[in-house]
Amino acid sequence: MSRLLEVEALEVSFGAASAVRGASLALDRGETLCLVGESGCGKSVTALAVMGLLARNASRGAARLSFDGQDLRGLDERGMSRLRGNRMAMIFQEPMTSLNPAYTVGSQMAEVMLRHRGGTRAAAMARAEDLLGRVRITSPAMRLGQYPHQLSGGLRQRVMIAMALMCDPELLIADEPTTALDVTVQAQILRLLLDLQKDLGLAMLLITHDLGVVARVAHRVAVMYAGEVVETAAAADLFARPTHPYTRGLLACVPVPGKVARGAALGSIAGVVPRLGPGFSGCGFRDRCGEATAACGGTIARASAGEGHDYLCRLPPGWRAGAGAAP
Amino acid sequence: MLEFLARRLLVALLVCATVLTFAFALTRLGGDLAISIAGPNATAADIEQVRVAYGLDRPLPLQFLEWVGRAATGDFGQSYFFKEKVSKLIFDRLPITFALGLVGLSIALAVALPLGIVSALREGSWTDRAISIVALLGQAMPSFWLGLVLMITLGLHLGWLPISGTGSWEHFVMPGIVLAFSAIPALLRLTRSGMIDALASDYIRTARAKGLSRRSIVLKHAARNAAMPVVSIAAVQLGFMLGGSIVIETVFALHGVGFLAWESISKNDFPTVQAVVLLLACIYTLLTLGADLLNAVLDPRLRAS
Ligand SMILES: Nc1ncnc2c1ncn2[C@@H]1O[C@H](COP(=O)(O)OP(=O)(O)O)[C@@H](O)[C@H]1O
Ligand code: SF4
Ligand SMILES: [Mg+2]
C-alpha cells in the first residue's frame, strides 16, 4: 500500500494565535484514521488545511503536504479545486446548513460530476440517484427534486455523503459527521460510513471526539492536543497501551480497553485547551498534566512506544503514575 | 404557495384601500375646494354653482363612495385644469414615467450589483473602502443639483445627450442616471452585506469543498442567496423612483406622471392629484407584491411556508 496522504509539521495560525503547531499525519489507501481530541485542539483546522479550505485570515505552512505523491503546497486555488470533490472530498459537522437552501438535492449533487467529469446532466442525475440509494435514502428519484429544507438532519447528512462520493474520491474527510444528529441517527450514519469505506476502499480521515466511534471504525488513531498530534498508533495498540498522559486522560473513563461504550465522552481532564502563541515552547499539555516537571518546559522529542506507535512526551513508554517523574 | 399568494394579495388590497381613503381625505382637508376651483375673482353665487356642479354639496361619505366606485372602474372624472379625462391624462404619461423608472433602476442595478459583489469579495480592502465612499458621496448629492451638473457637462459642453424632452431613448439617459444615483447606495450596501453573509456560510464552504469554480461559487451559490433582500429593496427603490420622478421630470421637462403631478398640484386640480397619488401608491404596492413573488421563486423555503 502506498501512502495516500502525508502531512508533516503542519502549522496553521490565525494572526497571532497558532491553531495547529507542527501536526503530522499519514494515511494509507483504504485506511481509516481517527483524529481525536477535545474541542478547540485544531482537528477541523487540520482537515481544512489539507483540503485547502482555510479561512482567508489563516496562514498555512508545512514541511510536507502531499496527496498521492503530489505536493499540495505549491498548488494554487485552481489546482486544489481540481482535486476537491474529485479525488478528495469532505463532509462537515453541520448537516443543517451545509447544503445550499436555494437549489435541489439533485442539482447540487449533479454539479460536482459536471464540474469534474463533464458529461450530460442526465447522466449526472442518474449517478446522483444511484448514490442516494447507496446511502440508503428511500425513493431516491423523488429526493432529487427536493430542497434541503424538506429533509431531516440525518437525511441531509446522507445527501452530503452521497454528494462527496459523486466522483469516486480516494480520500474522504469526515469532520464530526454525526455530532449534530440524534443518537439513533448517529449510529446509522456511522454504520453507513463504515460500510462505504469498506466497499469503496476509501481512505477516511474521521474526526470525532467519541471514543466509541474510534473503537468501532479506526484502523489508526491520532490524538491531538493544542495543535499537535501528541500520540499516534494503531487503534488496538492505542487502547491497549496509551502512553501520552493526555491519551491516558482521555481513556480514563474507559473500563475495558477497546470496549468503549458508544457515545462515551472524552475522559474528563481538569482545565481547557490553551490557545498558544507562536513563541510557545515546551510541552503544551504541561499546565494540565499530573506528571509535569521543570523538564517539560524544554524541548520535547518524539518518542517511540513500538512499531507505528509514537508520542510526544518526555516520559518513557510504559511509565506509571508517580514512578517515572524523574529527571 | 397559494396561501402565501393570497396573504400577500390581501395585504396589497388593504394598502390600496388605505391609500384610497387618504387620497380622498387629502384633497378635502386642504380647505373648501369649491372656492379654490372657482378662482380668486368668483362671487359667492359662482362658488355655489361650482359646488353643485362638482357634487361638492353632498355629504362627504357619499362623495367618497361615489369616487371609489368610479375609481374602481378606472374613471377618475374630469380634470379641472386640463379639461380632459384624468384617466387619459395619466395613461398618456405613464409610459414615460415607467420608462424613466426602468432606465433608472437598470442603471442602478448595473452599477450597484457588480460593485457590491466586488466589495464583498474584497471585504476590508482599499477597493471596498473606496466603493463605500463613492456610494456615500453619491447619496449626499441632491438630485436636482446632479441633474443640472449632468446637463451642463454631458449636455451643453460635450453635447452627448439631449438636455430635455422625450423624443428618443437618449432623453432618458441623463434623468435615469440621476434617479439611479439615489438608489445605488442602498442597493450596493445590501448586495455587499448579503454577499458577505452568503460567502461566510457553510454551504459556500461545501461548494468550495466540491471543487466548484470561483465563478460558480460567487455567482451561482452566493449571489442567489444574497439576491432576495436586494430584490425587495430594488422594488422599493423603483417605487421611490416613480414617486421621486416629480423632481427629475420637472428638471428635464419629461412629460410623465411626475410632471403631471407637479402641474396639477400647482393648479389645484384635485381629481388629477387624487388619481396620481392613488396610482403611485398602487404601483408601489404592486411592486412590493412582485418582489415578494420573485423572492418566493428564489427561495424554496418561502414557497413552502
Ligand atoms: N477562522 C478562524 N479564525 C480564527 N481562529 C480560528 C478560526 N478557525 C479556528 N480557529 C481557532 O483554531 C483553534 C482550533 O479550532 P478547530 O480546529 O475548529 O478545533 P476542533 O478541534 O474543535 O475542530 C481554535 O482555538 C479556534 O478558535
Ligand atoms: S512532557 Fe511533561 S507535561 Fe507534557 S505530557 Fe509529558 S510529562 Fe506531561
Ligand atoms: Mg471541529
Image (cartoon, coloured by chain):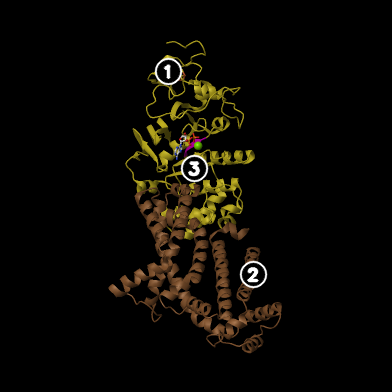
Chain colours: A yellow, B brown
Determine whether A231 is above or below A62 in the image. Answer: above
The chain that hosts pointer 2 is: B
Q: Amino acid at mark 3?
A: Leu
- Given residues A82 and A170, the one toward you in this image is A82
Tell me residue B2's x, y (percent): 64, 65
Q: Which residue is mark 1?
A: A296
- Given residues A108 and A117, the one toward you in this image is A108
Observer-side mark, 3 or 1, equals: 1
Determine whether B97 is above or below B124 in the image. Answer: below
Q: Which residue is mark 2?
A: B18
Circles 3 and 2 on the same subunit: no
Determine whether B182 is above or below A269 in the image. Answer: below
Residue A23 placement: quadrant: top left
Position of B210 compared to A264: left or right? left
Q: Amino acid at mark 1?
A: Cys
Report if the CB atoms under discs 3 and 2 are less than 8 Å apart: no
Image quadrant holding the N terminus of chain A, namely top left
Q: CA distance from mark 2 to mark 1?
A: 78 Å
The chain that hosts pointer 3 is: A
- Given residues B100 and A75, the one toward you in this image is B100
Find out if the beta carbon at label 1 lies less than 8 Å from the nearest ligand 2 atom. yes
Report if the CB atoms under discs 2 and 1 are less than 8 Å apart: no
Query: Residue drawn 60% across and 51% down?
Result: A151
Residues in magenta, as a range = A203-207
Q: Is residue A270 magenta?
A: no
Q: Furthest residue to the left?
A: B157
Q: Amino acid at mark 2?
A: Thr
Tell me which numbered mark, 3 or 1, is placed earlier along the sequence.
Answer: 3
Residue A226 showing in the rendered view: yes
Circles 3 and 1 on the same subunit: yes
